[in-house]
Image: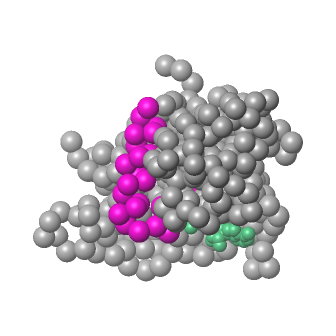
């Protein structure tokens, strides 16, 4: 077996705030293989975006990656100077944001910005840049791509604009795309279309994808594996179908049972009692313990490490595995 594309070990990103140290990401570990789609899921504020930004060195003061390791094809990214990270961003790893205008420049024609994006990392003729731009716009389902190169971002609908931003992310055939809630702001039907296209896209290339979403249903339709975050930590990860069928962490089960689309027909939907803890004063031990129906004394004392293997979870009293 070849080495994983991305190996994240015990990543920690903290923010110095007036109220104390906000441990937004506090020991996140996961592995991503080539061509794999990993869904990073968790409630709002669980640290998904900060994790995504940390992977590509986009954390700004008062935030800082204070520990851990991010290896891309074996190369350590944590601690690289920003000049080196700039060479990797956009080229080997690209990011798609919830707001496509984080990627697009409002005053430049799409064709111009795509050419500039290409030229930022390689010597390329205008002709080749144009061909490549048309190719990626076609891939994301933009009709009549050659003429759309002349359009400005505001001349696209919200869904089409997000497709253009995804096309920009594809320009350099990156090994990894990190997509942070890219369809959250879109209509449900457009969301479904883009999800379907992303599925085709990744299956036709070797590009790996980290799809970040607060919505477990969206993530599970796309991802082959999921990692569930709670209060800055991955509490469970594994193959999507297996995790949904038989979650091992009580928090994952709570998430699944609160989803209308994943619950058994006729089953009453539940919500997890209590609220997410403040990351400024996390309890020692498992951050979910105060809300957990299975918690016992060890849970308040220490957080166990992730188990090893296909199914990883951090829990003293995991749910039993269904076969
Ligand atoms: P998610 O994407 O899962 O909704 P985020 O990764 O955006 O959550 O945020 C995780 C935590 O980090 C939140 O509690 C948020 O308040 C905190 N955080 C993010 N950015 C900053 C910042 N610039 N300063 C202080 N805290 C921050
Ligand atoms: Mg976010």
- Residue at 43 percent across and 80 percent down: it is 274
What is the magenta segment's predominant secondary structure? helix
**Is residue 248 at all visible to an observer of this figure?**
no
The range drawn in magenta is 177-204
- Residue at 37 percent across and 66 percent down: it is 188
Q: Nearer the viewer, residue 36 or 290?
A: 36
Residue 314 location in percent, x, y?
A: 47, 52
Q: Is residue 135 left or right of residue 199?
A: right
Q: Is residue 14 left or right of residue 269?
A: right
- The picture quadrant where one finds residue 161 is bottom right
Q: How many marks?
A: 0
Q: Nearer the viewer, residue 104 or 310?
A: 104
**Is residue 199 at all visible to an observer of this figure?**
yes
- Quadrant position of the C terminus in the picture: top left
Tell me, yes or no, whether the highlighted magenta stretch contains residue 40.
no
Residue 71 location in percent, x, y?
A: 67, 35
- Residue at 46 percent across and 38 percent down: it is 202
Please identify the residue farthest to the front as the structure is shown: 147
Residue 127 location in percent, x, y?
A: 70, 32
Tell me, yes or no, whether the highlighted magenta stretch contains residue 185.
yes
Residue 156 location in percent, x, y?
A: 55, 62
């Amino acid at each position: 077996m070849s080495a994983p594309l991305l190996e994240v070990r015990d990543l920690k990103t903290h923010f110095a705030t007036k109220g104390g140290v906000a441990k937004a990401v506090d020991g996140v570990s996961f592995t991503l293989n080539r061509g794999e789609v990993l869904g990073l899921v968790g409630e709002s504020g669980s640290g998904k975006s900060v994790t995504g930004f940390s992977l590509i060195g986009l954390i700004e003061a008062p935030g800082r990656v204070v520990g851990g390791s991010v290896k891309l094809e074996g190369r350590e990214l944590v601690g690289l100077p920003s000049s080196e990270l700039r060479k990797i961003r956009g080229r080997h790893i690209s990011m798609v944001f919830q707001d496509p205008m984080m990627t697009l420049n409002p005053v430049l024609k799409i064709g111009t910005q795509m050419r500039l994006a290409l030229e930022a990392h390689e010597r390329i003729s205008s002709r080749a840049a144009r061909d490549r731009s048309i190719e990626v716009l076609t891939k994301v389902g933009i009709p009549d791509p050659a003429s759309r190169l002349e359009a400005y971002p505001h001349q696209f609908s919200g869904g089409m604009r997000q497709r253009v931003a995804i096309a920009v992310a594809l320009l350099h055939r990156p090994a990894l795309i990190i997509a942070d809630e890219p369809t959250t702001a879109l209509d449900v039907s457009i969301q479904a279309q883009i999800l379907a296209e992303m599925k085709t896209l990744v299956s036709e290339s070797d590009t790996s994808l980290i799809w970040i979403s607060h919505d477990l249903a969206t993530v599970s339709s796309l991802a082959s594996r999921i990692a569930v975050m709670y209060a800055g930590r991955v509490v469970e990860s594994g193959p999507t179908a297996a995790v949904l069928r038989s979650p091992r962490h009580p928090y994952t089960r709570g998430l699944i049972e609160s989803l209308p689309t994943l619950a058994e027909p006729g089953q009453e939907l539940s919500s997890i009692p209590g609220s997410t803890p403040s990351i400024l004063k996390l309890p020692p031990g498992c951050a979910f313990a105060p809300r957990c129906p299975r918690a016992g004394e060890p849970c308040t004392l220490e957080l166990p490490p992730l188990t090893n293997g296909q199914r990883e979870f951090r829990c003293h009293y995991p749910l039993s595995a269904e076969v």
